[in-house]
Amino acid sequence: MDGRLRVALVGCGAVAEYYHLPALLASPDVEVVALVDSSIERARALATRASTARTFTSYSELPG
């Protein structure tokens, strides 16, 4: 482990796309490990920008 904060972004709407995700990706102390949205297509679109393959349709699917 490299000490970075591992984050799952829940909700991939416009605010997440234009504000939350860019801020998370700009931080060297954060690793976006998953994206969650009820629209799997939306989650996958943002996952491409975040360079992560982990997408889910519900936060309850996230590994513990």
Image (cartoon, rainbow, N blue to C red):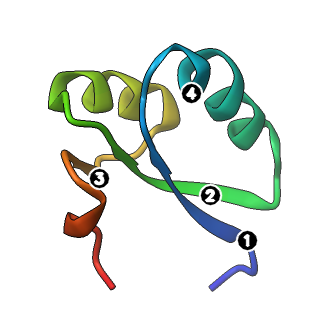
Q: Is residue 7 left or right of residue 8?
A: right
Compute the Cα span from label 1 to label 2: 6 Å
Q: Residue at x 19, y 66 (%)?
A: 61
Q: Is residue 1 left or right of residue 48?
A: right
Report the amino acid beneath label 3: Arg
Asked if 13 appears above or below 56 in the picture, the reply is above
Q: Secondary structure at mark 3?
A: loop
Compute the Cα span from label 4 to label 1: 20 Å
Report the amino acid beneath label 4: Ala
Q: Residue at x 67, y 32 (%)?
A: 20
**Sequence order check: which comes first, mark 4 or mark 1?**
1
**Foreground residue, 16 or 28?**
16
Q: Are marks 1 and 2 in contact (CB under 8 Å)?
A: yes
Q: What x and y, as percent, mark residue 49?
A: 48, 26
Q: Which residue is mark 2?
A: 31
**Mark 3 burial class by Cα count in 10 Å: few <14, some 14-19, many 20+:** some
**Sequence order check: which comes first, mark 3 or mark 4?**
4
Q: Are marks 4 and 1 in contact (CB under 8 Å)?
A: no
Q: Nearer the viewer, mark 3 or mark 4?
A: 4
Q: Are marks 2 and 3 in contact (CB under 8 Å)?
A: no
Q: Residue at x 75, y 80 (%)?
A: 3
Q: Which residue is mark 4?
A: 16
Q: Which residue is mark 1?
A: 4
Q: Which residue is mark 3?
A: 54
Q: Residue at x 29, y 52 (%)?
A: 54
**Sequence order check: which comes first, mark 2 or mark 3?**
2
Q: Are marks 2 and 4 in contact (CB under 8 Å)?
A: no
Q: What x and y, as percent, mark residue 47?
A: 38, 35
